[in-house]
Image (spheres, rainbow, N blue to C red):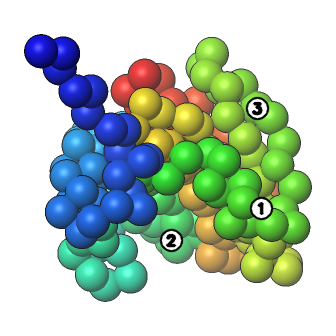
Amino acid sequence: MQDKAEPSAALVACGSATDRKKATAALWDPSLIAEAVWRQIGVDPSTLSSDIGGIDRIDGFKRCGGHDHPRIYSVDVWSQVYTVEDFIHKEAGAEFVPVTIAGRHGLWYRPASDRIGDHCNLIFASTLGSFSIEVLRLEPRISVTPGDRAIEVASVVVPLLPR
């Protein structure tokens, strides 16, 4: 009898709640990033959280992020069952620009909802969906753009992302 292949996490994301829980459980967890790495990218490890909007877990996503001191930028690293194509569809109106960081191809974009240029996302494909690095500028008088800051962060974080 032939073994039945397991569906990918991205495919089960739209299935039953049990399937979504299994897909979420299979995701790489950004909270595994060492405190030394967070310090290297300028995030104070005491500010780290895995909550998503105050909720400890949301099916389809794993997140870890925090901010620097003083609060200038927040940085989030995400692992999600949703594919790069899902994000392109969801962010209709955003311009996606190809980037290569640490030999990994991805896309740079500013969410369509960001009207003043304080937010930058980088997204990279994974075998179970995708990984995102999000940078939000909290202090508008800072001249370093969120895009430049996201590239700095990604140069350290992307080599840690599973292939």
Numbered-mark total: 3
Disc 1 designates what residue?
Answer: 110
Disc 3 designates what residue?
Answer: 99
Q: Split into 4 quadrants, where in the image is the N terminus? A: top left
Residue 105 lies, in percent from the top left, at 67, 26
In this orientation, which residue lies closer to the viewer: 89 or 54?
A: 89
- Residue in view at x 41 percent, y 62 percent: 14
- Secondary structure of the residue carrying tag 1 is loop
The earlier-in-sequence mark between 2 and 3 is: 2
Taking the image as drawn, is residue 51 in sight?
yes
How many residues crowd mark 3 within 10 Å: few (<14), some (14–19), many (20+)? Answer: some
Q: Nearer the viewer, mark 2 or mark 3?
A: 3
Disc 2 designates what residue?
Answer: 70
Disc 2 marks a residue whose amino acid type is Pro
Disc 1 marks a residue whose amino acid type is Arg
The earlier-in-sequence mark between 2 and 1 is: 2
Find the distance from the CA under tag 1 to the CA under tag 3.
13 Å
Q: Which mark is residue 157?
A: none
Find the distance from the CA under tag 2 to the CA under tag 1.
24 Å
Residue extending farthest bottom:
54
In this orientation, which residue lies closer to the viewer: 72 or 101?
A: 101
- Residue in view at x 76 percent, y 32 percent: 99
Residue 56 lies, in percent from the top left, at 22, 75
Is residue 24 toward the left or the right of residue 119 in the image? left
Q: Nearer the viewer, mark 2 or mark 1?
A: 1
Residue 40 lies, in percent from the top left, at 43, 39
